[in-house]
Image (cartoon, grey):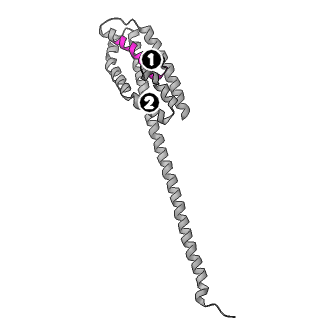
Amino acid sequence: MSEVPWKEKLLVPVVSIVLTGVVGSGLTVLFNHLDWKSRTKFEADKIAIENRRTEIKKIMALCQQRFFLSNMIYKYADESDYESVKNLDAEYTKVVRDWNFNLHINRLLLEQIFSPSVAEQFCDEDILKGDVKNSASVHSRFYLLGKEVGYVLKQIKRNEKPINLVECHNKLKDVGTALEDFYRNIIAYY
C-alpha cells in the first residue's frame, strides 16, 4: 500500500475550505444586495405615497377653500352684511384664480394617482369643451356656483341687494353634494 503524500492529503480540505468561503461570500453578497434592493424600493414607494398624499391634500384644501369662501359670501349676503362680503372678494378671487390655474394639473394628478374616472369626477371632458349643462363634475358645479357668487359680488359692489341668493344657495348644495361624493371616492382608495 502506498501512502498518499501529505500535499495531496491537504489538497482536498484546503480546496473545500476555499470553495466554501468563496461560495459563502458570494451568497452573502447576493443576499445583501437583494435585501438592499428591497429596502430601497420600499423606501421609494413610501416616499411616492407620501408625495401623492401631499398632492391630494392640496387639491382637497383648494376645494374646501373655494367652497368655504363661496358659502361665507352667500351667508353674509343673506344676512345683508355687505361689508363682510366686500372684504372676502379679493380672497375669493385669488382662490378662484388658483383653482383655474391648477385645474388641468390637478386633473392629471388625480388620473395618475387614482384613475380616469376620479379625474372625470373632478373635471370631466364636457366642461373642458364648454358644455356645462351635461357636466356633473366638481369643477362644473363650482363653475355654476361661481357665476352666482359673481352676480352677488357685482350687485353688492353696485350697492344693490342681491336678487339671486336662492339660486346661489341651491348651487352651494350642489357643490357640497359633488364634493362629498368626490371625497368618498378618494378616501375609498386609501
**Relative to 31, residue 184 above or below:** above
**Residue interval drawn in magenta:** 135-153
Residue drawn at point x = 37 percent, y = 25 percent: 100
Can residue 71 be seen at all in this image of the molecule?
no
Left/right of residue 127 with respect to residue 187 in the rendered view? left
Tell me, for residue 163, which label it has, or none.
none
Give the Cα distance between marks 1 and 2: 17 Å
Task: Name the spot of residue 159 as percent of width and height, x first.
Answer: 30, 7
Q: Amino acid at mark 2?
A: Arg
Residue at the limit of the structure toward the left, as seen here: 158
List the residue tagged with mark 1: 132
**Relative to 27, residue 147 above or below:** above
Q: Secondary structure at mark 1?
A: loop
- Reading the chain from its start, which is encountered first: label 1 or label 2? 2
The local crowd at label 2, few if under 14, some if 14 to 19, many if 20 or more residues have their Cα within 10 Å, is many
Residue at the limit of the structure toward the bottom, as seen here: 1
Residue drawn at point x = 36 percent, y = 24 percent: 95
- Label pair 1/2, CB-CB below 8 angstroms: no
Task: Name the spot of residue 156 as percent of width and height, x first.
Answer: 33, 9
Can residue 116 be seen at all in this image of the molecule?
yes
Q: Quadrant of the N terminus?
A: bottom right
Q: Nearer the viewer, residue 63 or 109?
A: 109
Task: Name the spot of residue 49 as percent of width and height, x first.
Answer: 48, 41
Left/right of residue 34 with respect to residue 72 in the rendered view? right
List the residue tagged with mark 2: 107
Q: Amino acid at mark 1?
A: Val
Prevalent SS, magenta region: helix
**Relative to 153, residue 94 above or below:** below
Of tags 1 and 2, the one toward the viewer is: 1
As for residue 46 lying within the magenta part, the answer is: no
